[in-house]
Image (cartoon, rainbow, N blue to C red):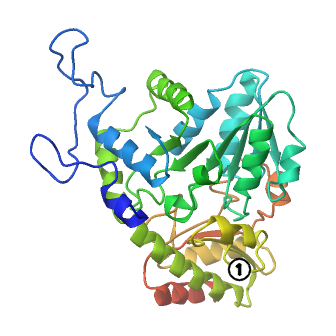
Amino acid sequence: MKFGTKAIHAGVEPDPSTGAIMTPIYQTSTYVQKSPGDHLGYEYSRTHNPTRTALQNSLAALENGKHGICFSSGLGAIDAVIKLFGPGDEIISTNDLYGGTYRLFTKVFEKYGIKFHFVPMADPKAVEEKINENTKMIWAETPTNPMMNIVDLKALSKISKKHKVLFGVDNTFASPYLQNPLDLGADLVMHSVTKYLGGHSDVVMGALIVNDDELAKQLVFIQNACGATPGPQDCFLVLRGIKTLHIRMERHSQNGKTIAAYLKNHPKVANVYWPGFEDHPNHEIAKKQMKDYGGMISFTLVGNKMEDAVKVMESFQLFALAESLGGVESLCGHPATMTHASIPKEEREKVGLVDSLIRLSVGIEDAEDLKNDLANALSKI
């Protein structure tokens, strides 16, 4: 099936008891057994739930994977991945990543003896130089949050296989519509389902997609043993959201291109970070591994004053100042004080995350209205 057909049909079957075309919300905690161990495949809803099963199957299909595993949040999914490792193990991560992931790595798991190396991944050689006998995983984002850096997934896949280490990719910013890391050699794909997959700012959820049966078995064990599982109502909402993923991503990408071009030519804007520009670092890699360039954009202001960034964000009418991204409505955020506040200032600024940086999640509204909103807000400084 082509992607648009998969988004609507993959993993979803009519309800066998009624023929309902939409997957029912199985709002139950437990399931009746005929005899101890004699059941219909479901015992307890932390372990399995039919609504969640349908969603997991759908997500696996979208990423061209074999196993989908859902969690109560994106961080819950990453938490499960790190629990594959133990004291003395080392993980190489991109140095430009979601602040919540950085906090989880450094504030939670480092005290259990897992060591993390944060390196710029635009050059794969920088990654390979950090690999040693204790390295167990390479963790990448592409495009990165919030600097929109592009990581060559095929190159990192070759390095991971050469050194026999796991290769995980946070594919949240791209979504399965724009990029499929498993096809490019990744072992594991993570999504904050909260974002583009849900698409309507009404669900918090995470997911992992893998092909390897043994890896899936380990992650499913952690999912059940640690219990960070989503409820059936949320699974239903994501199943509904996925049905329009391809349509939404097309519009996000169209609007992203329009807004990025507008910002690049604005006299009060210093830098615009969007992988669709030909002069964007590693643009040629993005061109090869992505279907389009999406609706995530970051930009800085001339003079680099935090007060100017705050004034702009307070002046928006359509771009709502809020955490998160990937919904149908446009959002703006200030990474230095919001999503990446847990990263020390000196570390942030090493990758270009300065005080005036504003991150936009461009929605699917009319692009002219969004441009007018930006024009008005920027006129206030």
In this picture, residue 340 sits left or right of residue 68: right
- Foreground: 103 or 326? 326
Could you tell me which secondary element the residue under label 1 belongs to? loop
Q: Which quadrant is home to the N terminus?
A: bottom left
Crowd band around label 1 with a 10 angstrom C-alpha radius: few (<14), some (14–19), many (20+)? some
Residue plotted at (67% across, 58% down): 142
The residue lying furthest to the left in this view is: 18
Residue plotted at (80% across, 59% down): 122
Residue 183's place in the image compared with 35, above or below, is below
Residue 343's place in the image compared with 268, above or below, is above
Regarding residue 24, the answer to whether it shows in the image is: yes
In this picture, residue 345 sits left or right of residue 293: right
The residue lying furthest to the top in this view is: 36
In this picture, residue 56 sits left or right of residue 337: left
Residue plotted at (64% across, 76% down): 311
In this picture, residue 377 sits left or right of residue 340: left
Q: Which residue is mark 1?
A: 277
Number of marks: 1
Image quarter for residue 205?
A: top left
Regarding residue 328, the answer to whether it shows in the image is: no
Residue 95's x, y, as percent? 78, 51
Residue 193's x, y, as percent? 46, 51
The residue lying furthest to the right in this view is: 129
- Foreground: 61 or 48? 61
Residue 187's x, y, as percent? 62, 41
Residue 167's x, y, as percent? 68, 42
Q: Which quadrant is home to the C terminus?
A: bottom right
The three-letter code of the residue at mark 1 reads Phe
